[in-house]
Image (cartoon, helix red, strand yellow):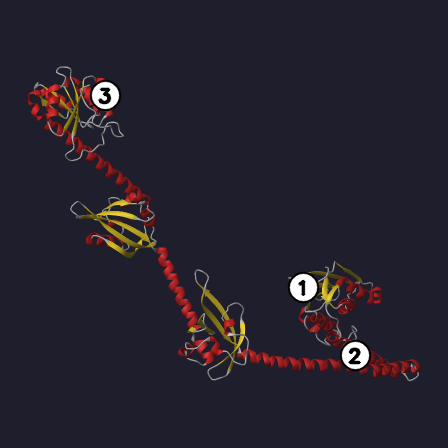
Amino acid sequence: MNGVGPEPADETGKGAGRRRGAGECVRVLVLADGSDGGSPALAALEAAPGIEAGLTASPEEFRQAAEGAAWDVILTGPERLAEALGLAGGRERPVVVVAPYQGEEATARWLEAGAADVVFEDRLAGLPAAVRRVADQACLRRERRGALAAMNNANRVLTALIRCAPLPIAVIDRRGTVNVWNPAAEEVLGWPKEEMLGATLRQMLKAGGLASLLEEALERGGLIGAETTQTRKDGAAVDLRIFCAPLTDEEDRSHGVIAMMVDVTERNLIIEAFRESKERFRNAFVHAPIGMAIVSREGRFLRVNPAFCRMLGYSETELLRLRAADLLDADDPEPTASALLAGGAQKEVRLRGKDGRAVYAQWNTSLITGAAGEAQYCISQVVDISAMKAAEEQIRRYAEDLERSNRDLQHFAYVASHDLQEPLRMVRGFMELLAKRYRGRLGPDADEYIRYAVDGAARMQNLIKGLLAYSRVGTQGKRLTPIDAAASLRQALENLQVVIEETGAEVTSGSLPWVMGDDVQLAQLFQNLISNAVKFRSGEPPRIRIAAAEEGEGFWRFSVTDNGIGFDPRHAERIFQMFQRLHGQGEYEGTGIGLALCKRIVERHGGRIWVESEPGKGSTFYFTLPKQRAGRE
């Protein structure tokens, strides 16, 4: 090989992407055609400045040289043109044919086959210029191809960015025609790309301000931060913030705009909700019927409402000069101002008004914290309870008077009933003695009068006993403790054993719970209700059923059901009043105290008693007792 290797090939192996710098040497590889060995052409090239040439004689040498070095131009004869073109990689490296002139048809054929140029052997002086020219043209083609590839790549990247952008993006030309409409625009505005592309803004966006803003951007060459409300295709409104940039040509002339839109509907809703919330707070603060104040952490009033001013007699300006501590009554050591503003539980405080009067208030403070949790200020709610305190004091005096009156009344009832027992027993005893000794001796009228007197004394004695028992319910009752209701029922049944056997009554019960109560009074309660059922029996033997069920969270509901004569439900409340009877003394014996005593016992236990009944269908008495707080069920 009579040639040189100018430099190693680039990464492609052919130097195809290599760009020749200005004034850089042109590298030419000569493929001899076998006639003269290419020496005239080689000599012409070697004589020219700025050209470096290498000669190969065989195809193998040419292939090795072509693949092993970065040659700019390949030189060959017409016989080996096809071989040279194959090794040159098409037009990546131009091939110049050197041959004797054989006519225009031959020249045209060589050029059509792929030769970059043809230099005739009788004109080899122009060979260096032809080599430089085709080398420059090849370099220019490579540069253009690289620029086009870069532009296409940039377009692909831009298209991908626009397609994947989370914000709506549109490209509009000078006529207002939509050329780009990305998926985010489809989602936010509702119009699919197929309908928008090629259409004008006015055709599609008839309702709303988006078309006008984009037309303004076309006229002005851009737009930043303008907002408008646009109607979606489905009719819903969406708030948009628009950013537009001009699209310009090489001479900086605008031929359209690219618009990016931000959906600010949710932001605007949040702002509007915040504004409304702020306005509601202001209205609630100003028009609140109770005192409200915004207080700094140092205790200074930052803002007060009219109710707070009226409560203390100060103007708003006067209060804003004061601290919370300045309003506290000096004679009331608790709570301190710092305790008032600490937040948490409601505190009762005594304040001093501007005129020196005491103002009792309930003060509740809420701490307002920042993002990091640090306290920034307080909102205090102050309720004037002066009238309530005065009412409480009056109620306390009334309660003391009532308690004293009740004690006196209970003492009087006890003393009266106790002191009446002895003379009444004497009257009854002598009347019975008189009836025993003189029955039939004083005449029938006298016998009847004596009987009336004995019966009246007996009823009076029963009334006194009933009054005595009624007065003792609240004064001599035991402390309420967990007791077995079933045990109290058994005691009541033992006390009524004789009357139950005489009347043939049948008394049954389900499982009864433990309750908080007085076992003696609970036995009295069962005894009175069962005795009442036996007394007001129908023609059949009495059938009495006692049961219990839960009533809410804290009580048991007991029921005593009978098959007696019943009564009109209009009298359901009257029968629990003292001395109220639905039947005459000749029909049924009694004092009218038994059910009143039952009510007093139940109420002492914190429960209530009521009855359901119909004439001829029996009655069911209900009462509630508290569940036990300790002990076993």
Query: Taking 226 as reference, is 382 left or right?
Result: right
Q: Is 602 in front, or is 244? A: 244
Residue drawn at x 37%, y 64% is: 275
| Label 3 secondary element | helix
Q: Residue at x 27, y 53 (%)?
A: 243
Give the CA distance from mark 1 to mark 3. 110 Å
Report the residue marked by disc 3. Answer: 63
Q: Earlier in the sequence, mark 1 or mark 3?
A: 3
Query: Toward the viewer: 147 or 479?
Result: 147
Residue 137 lies, in percent from the top left, at 15, 31
- For mark 2, give the secondary structure: helix
Circles 3 and 2: CB distance less than 8 Å? Answer: no
Q: Are marks 2 and 1 in contact (CB under 8 Å)?
A: no
| Image quarter in which the N terminus is found | top left
Q: CA distance from mark 2 to mark 1?
A: 33 Å
Mark 3 vs mark 2, foreground winner is: 3
- Residue in view at x 39 percent, y 62 percent: 274
Q: Residue 625's spot in the image, x, y percent? A: 70, 66
| Label 2 or label 1, whichever comes before in sequence order | 2
Please say if 189 is above or below 370.
Answer: above
Alpha-carbon neighbours of circle 3 within 10 Å: few (<14), some, or many (≥20)? some
| Residue 538 in the image, given as x and y percentages of width and height | 77, 65
Q: Which residue is mark 2?
A: 464
Residue occupying image coordinates x 31% and y 44%:
161
* Mark 2 surroundings: few (<14), some (14-19) or many (≥20) residues within 10 A: many
* Dot 3 amino acid type: Arg
Alpha carbon of mark 3 to alpha carbon of mark 2: how far? Answer: 143 Å
User: Which residue is tagged 1?
Assistant: 555
* Kind of residue sitting beneath label 1: Phe
Q: Is residue 148 above or below residue 102?
A: below
Q: Nearer the viewer, mark 1 or mark 3?
A: 3
N-terminal of the two: label 3 or label 2? 3
